[in-house]
Image (cartoon, helix red, strand yellow):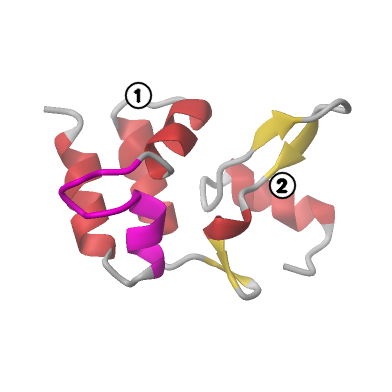
Amino acid sequence: MDLPITKARQLVKDRQLVAVRRGERNVLSVPADFLSGDQVLKGLPGTLTLLADNKYTDEEALRWMFTADESLPGTPVQALRDNRGTEVRRRAQALGF
């Protein structure tokens, strides 16, 4: 995204993005699929908010975003990339019920 690390961390703090620690050095990492060019993927922040409202941890949210869902079809992150954010948010909202 060509941002200073402080701005990138603020995006994570504001739940515009979600990141997990990975690798030998425990580096904070954001999946590349969460970006569209130099922007946050459209619909991702709202989806992350819905998942957090349903008590999903960051790790659980990441797992959900990359787990295939036959009703979409595909993964939620792929559906967001295909501009089907309403369908993804509908499913994320239903997780609480």
At x 78% / y 65%, what residue is drawn? Answer: 3
Q: Secondary structure at mark 1?
A: loop
Query: Could you tell me the amino acid type at mark 2?
Result: Arg
Q: Which residue has dot 2 on it?
A: 9
Q: SS class of the residue under badge 2? A: helix
Please state, as top left, top right, bottom left or bottom right, where the C terminus lies in the image: top left
Q: Position of residue 2 (x, y in %)?
A: 79, 69
Residue count near mark 2 (Cα–Cα under 10 Å), binned few <14, some 14–19, many ≥20: some
Residue 10 is left or right of residue 60, and the answer is: right
- Please report the residue visible at 45 percent of the width from the left and 33 percent of the height from the top: 63
Q: Amino acid at mark 1?
A: Lys
On screen, residue 8 versus residue 82, left or right, reads right
Q: Is residue 43 visible?
A: no
Q: Is residue 72 left or right of residue 25?
A: left
Can residue 77 be found in the magenta stretch?
Answer: yes
- What residue is disc 1 on? 55
The segment highlighted magenta reads 68-81
Residue 18 in picture, x, y percent from top left: 56, 43
Side (left or right) of 52 relative to 14: left
The foreground one among 24 and 9 is 24
Could you tell me residue 24's position as x and y percent? 86, 25
